[in-house]
Image (cartoon, rainbow, N blue to C red):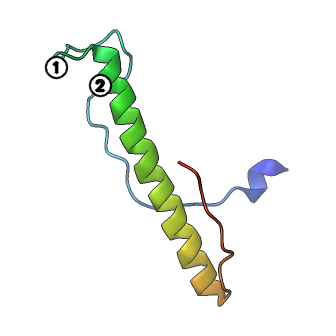
Amino acid sequence: PAHEKIGVVDSQWIVHQVVPSLGNQGQAENGKAPWEGVRERCRKEWGIFQTRIAEADKAYYEMMGVTPPNVTFVH
């Protein structure tokens, strides 16, 4: 079953920052609509996630004593 093949990618704790997650919540800041802030935060968090995945991959390959594949990701 697929659920048996899922592993832990990252053991870092995720802290809930009490930040509105929907575009119609919160208040406009610096002349931006609330949804623009949500989009910006989403992009930042996606970048952080991609970095953490890449670091986890690198650590895994090093632990296994294998040269990692040469993969380029398009952002």
Residue topped by disc 1: 29
Camera sees residue 47: yes
Of all residues, the one furthest to the top in this rendering is 24
Instruction: Name the residue nearer the viewer: 64 or 4.
Output: 64
SS category of the residue bearing label 1: loop
Decide: is 15 above or below 29. Answer: below
SS category of the residue bearing label 2: helix
Report how far apart the C-alphas of labels 1 and 2 lie in the structure: 8 Å
Camera sees residue 10: no
Neighbours of disc 2 within 10 Å: few (<14), some (14-19), many (20+): many
Q: Is residue 24 left or right of residue 5?
A: left
Residue topped by disc 2: 37
Label placed on residue 48: none
Instruction: Name the residue nearer the viewer: 56 or 10.
Output: 56
Residue 43 image offset from top left, x and y in percent: 41, 38
Q: Give amino acid for label 2.
A: Gly
Residue 59 image offset from top left, x and y in percent: 53, 77
Q: Is residue 16 left or right of residue 32?
A: right
Mark 1 in CB contact with mark 2 (< 8 angstroms): yes
Q: Residue at x 61, y 63 (%)?
A: 72
